[in-house]
Image (cartoon, helix red, strand yellow):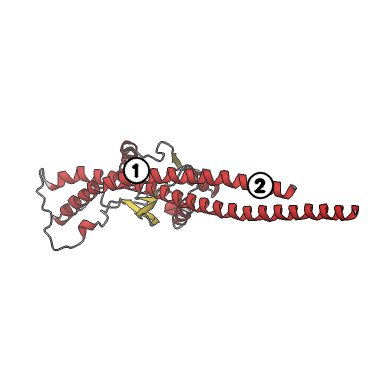
Amino acid sequence: MGKSREIKNRMKAVGNIKRITRTMQMIATSKFARAQQSSLATKPYTETLFGLVGQLNAAGVGEGHPLLSTPEGDAPELTLVITADRGLCGPYNGSLVRTALKHLKSDARISGGPIEVVGKKGASTLRFNGFDGFHHHTQIGDKPRYEDVERIAQTFIDAFTAGEVSAVRVVYMKYISAGKQKPEILQLLPFSAPVTESDAPSGGANDIYEFSPDAASLLDSILPAAVKAVLFQCFNDAVVSEHIARMVAMKAATDNAGKMGQSLKRQFNRARQAQITTELTEIISGAAALE
């Protein structure tokens, strides 16, 4: 009797876990749809900025610009690590932190330089590995606003142009598709426009830009905007990838809970059948002894 009651309690606990994980999966799916829409909505703007920067570079403008050239001296590099505030998202945080630690330990200029972290999981893991002097951004959350990201990017631009850091790199989870995301180390400064689909050669007509005012003056306003747009895209990709990872992890947990529930149900049926058989045997044996 005790064994069947124990199995029944375990079945109830597994059922509760299954309902929780299914709910978390549905929430992650809903958040993923909204985050993906936001991420895709910003790409045309960033790609247009990249096209303008490419046209300016093709016109021979930009050589010696503070945001395009590495400052002189032995200034350290700044590293920004974007992780999640919450767990239960599979290998998402683990793969990001492993990539960040490998990058930080690759060079003394990197490990000794300023480190900034987004997300509680990344902050706790870096602190556990001996990196204590980092700056933790707690204002972002899972809904990054452009205003917050813009302020962070501006501090990077100011530190880079002042020569305090020689480079700014971002460790984040790049969103490629719903079935593929990978941790990536992006060089934010000195700025280099990523290759986009619009940069690929095609048989159609290319965009032709007329610059007013002159290209050099225009570059001074376009480059900071492009840096901020790239960083905002990194945050959006990270949020989308986190929701995908949590959605996949919760689906796997729900499926495993269902399989465990079926296994426990079979064990319960066997235990109950054995108990009934034992009771019948005792009744028959007692009746036979009375004859």
What percent of the width, then of the height, locates residue 45?
A: 23, 46
Crowd around label 2: few <14 · some 14–19 · many ≥20 (10 Å): some
What residue is rendered at 43% in x and 42% in y? 27
Up/down of 255 relative to 150, above or below = below
Of 58 and 89, which appears nearest the observer? Answer: 89
223 displayed left or right of 122: left
Which amino acid type is marked by label 1? Arg
What residue is rendered at 52% in x and 44% in y? 19
What percent of the width, then of the height, locates residue 130?
A: 54, 48
Viewer-nearest of labels 1 and 2? 2
222 displayed left or right of 265: left
Which residue lies under the disc numbered 1?
34
Of 120 and 59, which appears nearest the observer? Answer: 120
Which residue lies under the disc numbered 2?
8
Find the distance from the CA under tag 1 to the CA under tag 2: 40 Å
Label 1 vs 2, first from the N-terminus: 2
Of 234 and 70, which appears nearest the observer? Answer: 234
276 displayed left or right of 202: right
What percent of the width, then of the height, locates residue 197?
A: 23, 57
Q: Secondary structure at mark 1?
A: helix
Image quarter where the C terminus lies is bottom right
What percent of the width, then of the height, locates residue 16?
A: 57, 43
